[in-house]
Image (cartoon, rainbow, N blue to C red):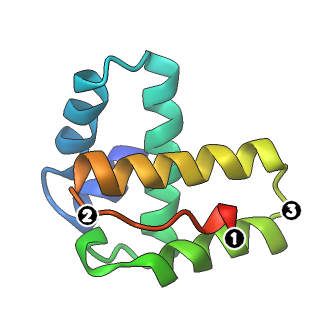
């Protein structure tokens, strides 16, 4: 399943929302690919649930999984955390705490 398919299955139009927010912030293509990757993995981790129904505890669970089971480097964890922060703040218009800082 491709990244965009994952987002569209969780909520139709979500891919376009993410891409529009990325372009509004004038991020480069690599940042777009990276953000779409982590946002899609987050949605897949939570069984394609609509991200509007997910909160801080869901974000923390995903990052904890990446840290403790996938053993990602600190840099990759920061990428994932930044992608989720961007997603919630700039795409969904929600403010979530940064669980990576905890």
Tally of marks = 3
CA distance for labels 1 and 2: 31 Å
The reply to whether discs 2 and 3 touch (Cβ–Cβ < 8 Å) is: no
Res. 102 mark: 1
Q: Position of residue 101 (x, y in %)?
A: 67, 62
Q: Position of residue 62 (x, y in %)?
A: 59, 72
Quadrant assignment for the C terminus: bottom right
Res. 71 mark: 3
Quadrant assignment for the N terminus: bottom left
Name the front one of labels 2 and 3. 3
N-term-proximal mark, 1 vs 2: 2
Name the front one of labels 3 and 1. 1
N-term-proximal mark, 2 vs 3: 2
Mark 3, Cα crowd under 10 Å, few <14 / some 14-19 / many 20+, is few
| Residue 99 against residue 79 in the figure, above or below | below
Q: Tell which of 93 and 67 is nearer to you.
A: 93
CA distance for labels 2 and 3: 28 Å
Q: Residue at x 32, y 17 (%)?
A: 26
Would you identify the image quadrant in which residue 72 lies? bottom right
Q: Residue at x 22, y 57 (%)?
A: 92
Dot 3 lies on which element? loop
Name the front one of labels 1 and 2. 1
Looking at the image, can residue 1 be seen? Answer: no
Q: Tell which of 67 and 94 is nearer to you.
A: 94
């Amino acid at each position: 399943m491709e990244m965009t398919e994952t987002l569209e299955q969780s909520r139709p139009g979500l891919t376009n929302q993410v891409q529009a927010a990325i372009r509004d912030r004038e991020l480069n293509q690599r940042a777009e690919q990276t953000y779409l990757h982590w946002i899609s993995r987050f949605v897949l981790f939570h069984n394609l649930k609509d991200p509007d129904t997910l909160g801080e505890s869901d974000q923390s669970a995903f990052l904890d999984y990446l840290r403790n089971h996938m053993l990602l480097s600190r840099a990759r964890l920061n990428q994932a955390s930044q992608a989720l922060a961007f997603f919630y703040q700039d795409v969904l218009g929600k403010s979530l705490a940064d669980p990576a800082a905890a």
